[in-house]
Amino acid sequence: MKTILWATLTANGNYAQSGPDNPPKKEALDDFTAQANAAGNLIVGRRTFEGMQDPSRISAEEQANAGGPFTGLDIVVLSKSAQAIPGVTVARSPQEALDFLRKKGHPTALVSGGAEIHNAFLSQGLIHEVIFNVVPVMEGKGLNLLIDQEAYRHKPVQLLDCKSLGSGVVQLRYAMNG
């Protein structure tokens, strides 16, 4: 199974921290929806999942579309503390999440939603590709990708694609080599 990590980064390399004063770029959200629908699944953390359920973050068009843009997807919430969540699968580890999707017949898994989730998958060597949407903003604070410094002291990656999504958002897609 190919595992793809999807993230939005700021121009200075931090995870983009969206909020009322810095809403996510529509182009990045549209790409996220397209990537999730292409994979047929999504692995996210509990806080990200809860944010996805917030009606103020969903457009009127999506609310009218019987459940929004992720209807019909196999959604796995990665959490050590969450109990059962209606309509989704809760996994306790990255491997458990991937095993579930593999058993469902998915050839690709899409991982998004939080530095902790990303770093957990990266530290275990479970990511095959990364998609970074770089947004045109600089942040003085933020979270970073933290990878195992022994295993990834200098981890070569291969650029697969680079394109503009519009509004200054640039998408970089890399294959993780080895």
Image (cartoon, helix red, strand yellow):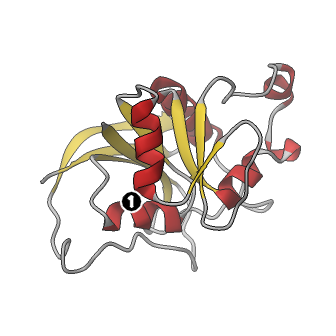
Q: Can residue 142 be seen in this view?
A: yes
Q: Which of 143 and 170 is in front in this view?
A: 143
Q: Quadrant of residue 58?
A: top right
Q: In which quarter of the image is residue 18?
A: bottom right
Q: Which of 170 and 17 is in front in this view?
A: 17
Name the residue rendered at 75%, 28% in the picture.
68
Look at the image and tell me in which quarter the C terminus lies.
Answer: bottom left
Q: Residue furthest top?
A: 65
In the image: residue 169, left or right of residue 64: left
Number of disc labels: 1
SS label for mark 1: helix
Name the residue rendered at 40%, 69% in the picture.
145
In the image: residue 156, left or right of residue 82: left
**Classed neighbour count for the residue bearing mark 1: other residues with Cα under 10 Å, few (<14), some (14–19), many (≥20):** some
Q: Can residue 170 be seen in this view?
A: no
Q: In this view, does 17 lie above or below 77?
A: below
Q: In this view, does 115 lie above or below 111?
A: below
| Residue 100, position as x, y percentages in the image | 47, 40
| Residue 99, position as x, y percentages in the image | 41, 43
| Residue 97, position as x, y percentages in the image | 48, 48
Q: Which amino acid does label 1 sit on?
A: Phe
Look at the image and tell me in which quarter the N terminus lies.
Answer: top left
In the image: residue 81, left or right of residue 68: left
| Residue 120, position as x, y percentages in the image | 42, 66
Name the residue rendered at 52%, 50% in the picture.
112
Residue assigned mark 1: 121
Q: In this view, does 85 lie above or below 14?
A: above
